[in-house]
Image (tube, rainbow, N blue to C red):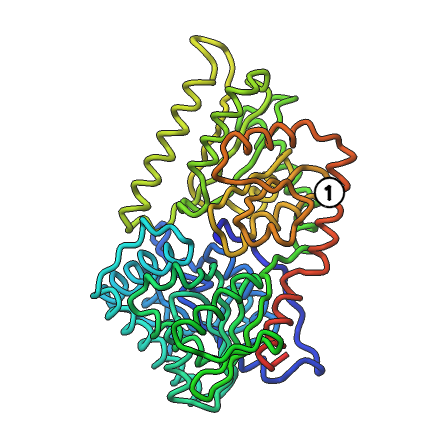
Amino acid sequence: MTRPAAQPAEAPNPTDSEPSSLSRLIVVSNRQPYEHKHVKGQLVCQRTDGGLTAALDPVLRRFGGTWIAWGSGEADREAAGPGDSLQVPPDGPRYRLRRVWLTPEEVKGGYQGYANEVLWPLCHITLDRVAYRKAYWEAYQTLNRRFAETVQEELRARPGPVWIHDFHLSLLPRLVKEASPESAVSVFWHVPWPGPDVFRILPERREVLEGLLAADSLIFQTPGYARSFADCAKQFLQAEVDPAAETAQYRGHRTRLSARAISVDVRFFSEAANTDKVRKAMAQTRRKLGLAGGIRLGLGVDRLDYTKGLLKRLWALDTFFARYPHYRGRFTFLQVAVPTRSEVEAYRRYREVIQQTVAEINARYGPAGQEPTRWRPVLYLEGRIGLHTLVSYYRMADLALVSSVYDGMNLVAKEYVASQVDENGVLLISQMAGSAEELTEALIINPYDPEGMADAIHHALQMPLEEQQQRMRAMRAYLEQHDVHTWVAECLRDAGRG
């Protein structure tokens, strides 16, 4: 998921009825919730972007506990306290952040290499982008051992349930269990899980599966991903899978398999969308972007990742302006792109292609000659944006377009719906995104069909207000019942700790 992160509302203190074990919860992830940088000569602590931080930071603010993560910030070592830890958030400490230090070789081979150039494209079934090296696997093993050492130090000092997140740490459950068999270990797998026909490509498929099956609870975004994992466990490990009991048994250890879709704080986004600050930001944005009265607005908010389908989205917009020329000067698409993994060559090339394609579309359909207008078919903004600006974009947008070629969930779709306090606007979402299974009142699109996407954009712009409101009202009602707090409670219950 990955996009500009929202700041969470202040979470309440735990009550006496809430499990005391949660105050000892150990969350483990590659990405840290806060990082330190030097800004104008000052040491600054900043909250990081991404759905993982947006979902889990409020949990630890509420219950306390410890978050173990890679200290990736340029000034993190300078800010670390005794035991490589510190209290966060900086403006009102509520929990402890413990940082893991990785060597340049571990970062390059384990994180950038095996995690991002092997597992990421494999899980998203973009197989032509898999760049396997045997040395990557060795570094990935070392990276996981480094995290395991830190987790064991924490468990020796203060035992508690361990909640591991995502594909960077697939070997960690086994390493933790080997050292601490009595510890409760749960894993949430944020990205898709491919079926056996794809997963067989991975030379270390057995080791990855064995690492994950050491967990007591293994949770996926959708039932389909959970079934795909079970199929891989059966085919490559001959694990005993009981679909009725939602369990997999391997070498005498039973793992619960379940699906819990990650979500957003609906109340927080709704309240933010109703603030004077957001209303002022909406007016300022229209002036800044040259959106004169009557110009309809489409929106995309994505990391600059090839799995988000940005290039296919631009092809669809090209087709839209060619097929519906009367929308020239009447519709603008605003694309917010957040750079990511710029150290990986494939991402640098992808960014260049996106920028070039935007320029070509604007040259093809934009104002000709010396026409006195600021209108552009596509407005392309790169970089991080603040919360109120992001929510103002959501509120302003007549439509939001999510065109992922494969996506574990996609929280932008849910944030857009949560921000529509006027209950209008249209969500267009790829059938390949996990959230399409939940937000069924959206217009479901095929990212591989640019003509179909262009027609869907036209359909959204022509949709009567009454139909927009009916669809949006239904999606908002669903999210209110399935927000991030429900997700946390269900995941912890699956782990036997809720």
Q: Position of residue 192 (x, y in %)?
A: 47, 59
Q: Nearer the viewer, residue 70 or 61?
A: 70
The answer to whether residue 189 is above or below residue 186 is above
- Is residue 74 among the parts visible in the rendering? yes
* Residue 348 in the image, given as x and y percentages of width and height: 30, 43
Q: Which residue is mark 1?
A: 471
**Foreground: 359 or 322?**
322
- Residue drawn at (36%, 67%) of the image: 70
The quadrant in which residue 330 appears is top right
Q: Identify the image quadrant of residue 59.
A: bottom right
Sort mark 1 into few (<14), some (14-19) or many (20+) by Cα contacts within 10 Å: many
Q: Residue at x 55, y 26 (%)?
A: 332
Q: How far across and down, in percent of the image, does residue 176 sit?
A: 40, 83
- Location of residue 247 in the rendering, given as x and y in whole percent from the top left corner: 55, 78
Q: Residue at x 63, y 32 (%)?
A: 283
Q: Which amino acid, mark 1?
A: Arg
